[in-house]
């Protein structure tokens, strides 16, 4: 696929499911703005000529007119622009809500921004720098974070862009509709080489994408590498399946609500997982003590993504990790996971089991790894 300059284009190519709706809204706003700009310009010229000062003409007396006709005119020129503006708002809001809710069956890919490059990781293990390969007509979700400053992942042909922030995860999704190669830009000034932080999205047919993916990295999937890191960091010492562990259960917990010691609750997602590993004392899961150590400085951003994928795979019927590594649920968190056995079948753990474990850098946030602890 080449990306040679094409003939002059007023707009970028339309290559995603969002492009038609974004272009339609933009065209509507341009036409409305152009119409009223021309109308105002015409009226200015018309009234300037019609009511110009003529030699010998007296100064007209001001008219104090509070007639019904004047009120109707004022209401009309207020209501019509208001209605047109509300259409813009509703149309734009509908697009925003759609763009902020990726489908559950989306293909998940991790993106890390770093001055001045984009690092891409596929769940199957493939890695890329400043390139992103995706299949056509497939929903793709990008889970993004930054290693340094604020960046912005922008693909003009897809009409999608989202901030990439240090210390947290953001998401962006799209469905490519045309095979081809499309530019990636950083749309947030990030330093002296900001203009060079570019890349390319390659949209392939399903067959070609499978062939490309099969090349892989030879190091296993992200979840498998995450399992290895999970054990290497000692997380398995507390998140165990025999009922004697001191850490919360991770099986089926991702995506669920976690009740905290302060009476509040939080959703077990990527950001919560990251926070719990790096700052385990920030949010303590109900029923557990503050005993989990921090793993800040011990886990790279790539390692964090692998741990998160491992945690996601626990309890996922389609996941790549088997149940041999699944920890046992604590009675205090039976409502946290969707696949927990009934309380009557839960083995009774010793007194220490109700406390949080200095669990390893499990990527499982407070609930599974420790902030809770």
Image (spheres, rainbow, N blue to C red):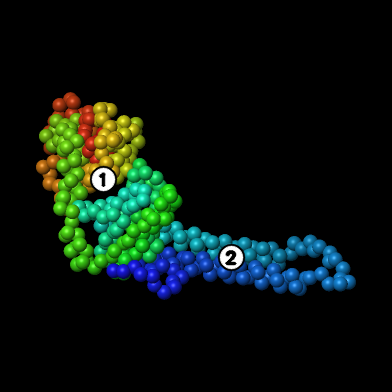
Image side of residue 105 versus residue 57, left or right: left
- The crowd level at tag 2 (other Cα within 10 Å; few <14, some 14-19, many 20+) is few
Where in the figure is residue 282, as x and y percent of width and height?
33, 33
- The crowd level at tag 1 (other Cα within 10 Å; few <14, some 14-19, many 20+) is some
Q: Which residue is drawn at 52% across and 67% down?
A: 30
Indicate the secondary structure of the residue bearing disc 1: helix
Where in the figure is residue 28, as x and y percent of width and height?
50, 68
Mark 1 or mark 2, earlier in chain: 2
- Mark sitting on residue 124: none
Determine the residue located farthest toward the top in the rendered image: 351
Quarter holding the N terminus is bottom left
Between marks 1 and 2, how big is the CA–CA gap? 53 Å
Question: Of the residues tagged 1 and 2, which is closer to the observer?
Answer: 1
Mark 1 lies on residue: 302
Image side of residue 246 versus residue 150, left or right: left
Question: With respect to residue 373, does 12 lie above or below?
Answer: below
Where in the figure is residue 367, as x and y percent of width and height?
26, 37
The part of the image, by quadrant, that contains residue 4 is: bottom left
Q: Residue at x 20, y 38 (%)?
A: 249
Where in the figure is residue 336, as x and y percent of width and height?
24, 40
Q: Viewer-proximal residue, 91 or 299?
A: 299
Mark 2 lies on residue: 80
Question: With respect to residue 18, does 187 lie above or below?
Answer: above
Q: Residue at x 38, y 65 (%)?
A: 157
Q: Viewer-proximal residue, 301 or 174?
A: 301
Note whether residue 344 is visible. no
Quarter holding the C terminus is top left
Note whether residue 96 is visible. yes
Indicate the secondary structure of the residue bearing disc 2: helix
């Amino acid at each position: 696929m080449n990306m040679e300059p094409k003939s002059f284009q007023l707009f970028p190519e339309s290559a995603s499911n969002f492009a038609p709706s974004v272009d339609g809204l933009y065209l509507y706003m341009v036409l409305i703005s152009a119409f009223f700009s021309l109308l105002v310009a015409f009226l200015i010229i018309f009234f300037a000529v019609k009511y110009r000062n003529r030699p010998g003409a007296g100064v007209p007396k001001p008219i104090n007119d509070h007639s019904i006709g004047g009120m109707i005119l004022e209401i009309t020129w207020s209501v019509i622009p208001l209605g047109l503006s509300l259409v813009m708002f509703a149309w734009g809001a509908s697009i925003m809500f759609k763009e902020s809710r990726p489908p559950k069956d989306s293909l998940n890919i991790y993106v890390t921004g770093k001055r001045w490059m984009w690092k891409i990781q596929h769940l199957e293990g493939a890695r890329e720098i400043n390139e992103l390969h995706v299949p056509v007509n497939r929903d793709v979700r990008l889970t993004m974070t930054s290693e340094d400053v604020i960046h912005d992942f922008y693909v003009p042909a897809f009409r999608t862009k989202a901030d990439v922030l240090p210390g947290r995860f953001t998401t962006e999704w799209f469905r490519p509709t045309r095979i081809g190669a499309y530019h990636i830009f950083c749309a947030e000034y990030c330093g002296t080489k900001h203009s060079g932080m570019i890349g390319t999205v390659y949209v392939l047919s399903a067959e070609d994408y499978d062939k490309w993916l099969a090349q892989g990295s030879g190091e296993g999937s992200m979840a498998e590498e995450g399992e290895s890191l999970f054990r290497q960091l000692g997380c398995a010492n507390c998140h165990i399946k025999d009922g004697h562990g001191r850490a919360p259960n991770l099986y089926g917990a991702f995506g669920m609500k976690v009740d905290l010691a302060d009476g509040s609750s939080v959703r077990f997602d990527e950001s919560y997982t990251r926070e719990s590993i790096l700052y385990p004392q920030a949010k303590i899961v109900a029923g557990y003590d503050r005993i989990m150590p921090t793993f800040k400085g011990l886990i790279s951003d790539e390692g964090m993504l692998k741990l998160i994928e491992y945690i996601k795979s626990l309890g996922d019927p389609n996941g790549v990790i088997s149940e041999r590594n699944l920890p046992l649920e604590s009675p205090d968190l039976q409502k946290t996971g969707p696949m927990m056995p009934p309380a009557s079948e839960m083995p009774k753990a010793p007194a220490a089991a109700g406390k949080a474990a200095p669990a390893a850098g499990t990527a499982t946030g407070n609930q599974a790894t420790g902030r809770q602890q």
